Amino acid sequence: MNRTLFLTNLKAHKMLFVIMNLVLLMYSSIMIYMFDPETSNAIAEMMEMLPKGFAVAFGFDDIAITLTSHIGSYLYGFIFIVFPMIFTVIAANSMVAKHVDRGSMAYLIATPNSRKTIIWTQAISLITMLTGLFVIQTILGILMSEMMFSGLLEVGPYIKINLITLLVFGVVSGIGFLGSCIFNESSRSLSMGISFPVAFLLLKMLSGASPDLSFLKYFTPYTLIDINKIMNTGNYTLWTSVALIIASFLIYFSAVTIFDKRSLNL
């Protein structure tokens, strides 16, 4: 890994990183503030009044009684998918394809560093920023919960929810990074980076909208962010994490291999 290039990447995405953290912090603080142990049953009754397909499609199908399930159901069913997805699409495209499109990749390749060193630095930069996003939100979520409802957050399950969500985006970011390594044009890379995550989200929503479409959940990694299983099934987090890490590595490795061997036409 090239340290100078790594730090340059972090600096270039600093504003995007800060904005995404602030947006997620805003939604987290609002949702945590809305939790009321005494009225949780009333919220459950209100959610039952919504059409079943609507509630499931937006991740509100699990009735939240505890603070942890409240945060998990109302944030990680939609909000913590959409905004990290936006961050991932933009950052993945800018790691490689944008450099090739602008011609700046020629200067990077002209340095004494090998192609693999450059591309692995770009991959590690993307993974580091994505990890940082979720680590910060996890810490802030714990702190806000303790400030507003001391002792009510189940910290262990909450960390597991964030871990699975992060690893799911390891796969999603890998797909975007793969597109960035395949295409010379930033627009084509961006198209691939957008189409897959959005398709995954639509499949997740459609799978919950009707029992006849429930099979669609097997075609989107977002289904793995299953709050109920993460909180209540013993080995779910472990085996899901292993599977996601392997999948992410294979996608990133494929991206690096493709970039290392293809002609860039610079």
Image (cartoon, rainbow, N blue to C red):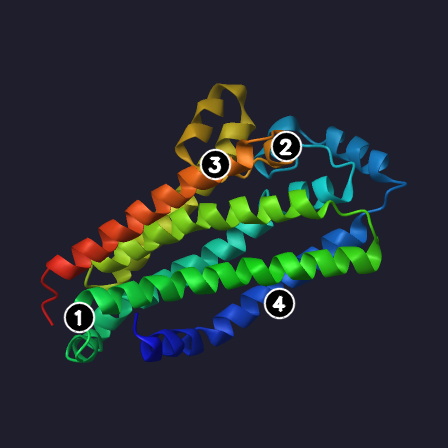
Residue lying at 74% horizontally and 61% vertically, measured from the top left: 143
Rounded to the nearest whole Å, what is the CA distance between mark 1 and mark 3? 34 Å
Query: Toward the viewer: 183 or 254?
Result: 254
The amino acid on which the numbered mark 2 sits, given as a three-letter code, is Asn
Q: Residue 122 location in percent, x, y?
A: 32, 66
Identify the residue under disc 2. 228
Mark on residue 240?
3
Quarter of the rendering containing residue 114: bottom left
Depth order, front residue of 53/95: 95
Q: Earlier in the sequence, mark 2 or mark 1?
A: 1
Residue 22: which numbered mark, if any? 4
Which of the marked residues, 1 or 4, is nearer the chain's N terminus? 4
Horizontal relation, residue 78 to residue 27: left or right: left
Location of residue 232 with respect to 125 vertically, above or below: above
Name the outermost residue toward the top: 212
Residue matched to label 1: 114
